[in-house]
Image (tube, rainbow, N blue to C red):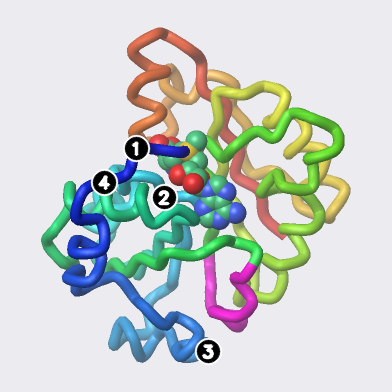
């Protein structure tokens, strides 16, 4: 998601009390950051934050961390959600560096409308490619759980294959999430697709 530069972007980020500026300092100690032993759920590519902010309010006993690659996008989330929640932290970082920040402490990873990278030569950039699944191995604690939703059928199909080849099994697969009985919190992107009646693909995979 590339957006026009947000005026005062740095001011919004500098003053955000729940943005973790040096996340590497907390590697292995994220439970201390939250001050409890509750599970930690991670959203990769949180965009403008609708999903993770609402999830954190619905599930106060779960700790949430949202990461976003582009500071310009994250600043918009901070502007939209200025109030700190006790169970939510956010980080401006690329998922490629997750191992520098977490060590066997994540219970669930959410991938919501990840960039599809449709070309063969860039398929390793998909967040469900083997390159990323290896990175996730190092940050998961115990059972690994990935929950994904996307409008993009090609990304969805390639993710099913990649996850399955990597040893994940599927607890739930659905090709029309918003007409199912699966509980669902909408993301910014999803709202636009739902308004256009575009079907959303959903999977929950465990290893
Ligand atoms: C298509 S947008 C979806 C945003 C939001 N999840 C939603 O559903 O509305 C994908 C987001 O993932 C972020 N992203 C892509 N690759 C990433 C990576 N390797 N690490 C962190 N964020 C990433 C992008 O910057 C963008 O904000």
Q: Which residue in the protein does label 4 denote?
A: 6
- Name the residue: 19% across, 74% down: 17
Q: Quadrant of residue 87?
A: bottom left
How many other residues sit within 10 Å of disc 2, few (<14), some (14-19) or many (≥20)?
many
| Image vertical order of residue 23 relative to residue 119, above or below | below
- The kind of secondary structure element at disc 2 is loop
Task: Give the extent of the magenta segment.
Answer: 97-107
Whole-Å distance between the Cαs marked 4 and 3?
A: 33 Å
Which residue does the image show at 65% across and 33% down from the upper left?
116
Whether pointer 1 and pointer 4 mark residues with C-beta atoms closer than 8 Å, the reply is yes
Q: Select label 4 or label 3 by which is in front.
A: 4
Residue 66 appears in which quarter of the rendering? bottom left
Q: Which numbered disc, 3 or 1, marks the residue that appears first in the sequence?
A: 1
Disc 4 versus disc 2: distance between alpha carbons?
17 Å
Q: Which mark is residue 28?
A: 3
Distance, label 1 to label 4, CA atoms, is 6 Å
- Left/right of residue 132 with respect to residue 115 in the rendered view: right
What residue is disc 2 on? 46
Q: Which residue is mark 1?
A: 4
State the CA–CA distance, disc 1 to disc 2.
Answer: 17 Å
Check contact, mark 2 vs mark 3: CB within 8 A.
no
- Depth check, mark 3 against mark 1: the one in front is 1
Viewer-proximal residue among 174 and 112: 112
């Amino acid at each position: 998601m590339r957006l026009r530069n947000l005026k005062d972007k740095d001011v919004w980020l500098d003053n955000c009390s729940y943005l973790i500026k040096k996340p590497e300092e907390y590697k292995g100690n994220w439970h201390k950051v939250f001050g409890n032993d509750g599970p930690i759920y991670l959203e990769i590519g949180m965009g403008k934050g609708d999903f993770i902010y609402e999830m954190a309010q619905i599930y106060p006993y779960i700790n949430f961390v949202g990461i976003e690659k582009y500071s310009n996008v994250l600043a918009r989330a901070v502007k939209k959600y200025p109030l700190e929640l006790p169970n939510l932290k956010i980080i401006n970082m690329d998922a490629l560096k997750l191992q520098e920040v977490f060590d066997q402490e994540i219970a669930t990873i959410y991938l919501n409308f990840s960039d599809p990278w449709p070309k063969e030569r860039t398929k390793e950039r998909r967040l469900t490619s083997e390159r990323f699944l290896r990175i996730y191995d190092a940050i998961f604690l115990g059972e690994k759980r990935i929950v994904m939703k996307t409008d993009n059928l090609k990304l969805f199909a390639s993710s099913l294959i990649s996850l399955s080849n990597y040893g994940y099994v599927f607890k739930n697969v659905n090709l029309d999430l918003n007409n199912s009985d699966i509980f669902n919190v909408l993301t910014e992107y999803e709202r636009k697709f739902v308004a256009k009646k575009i079907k959303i693909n959903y999977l929950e995979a465990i290893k």
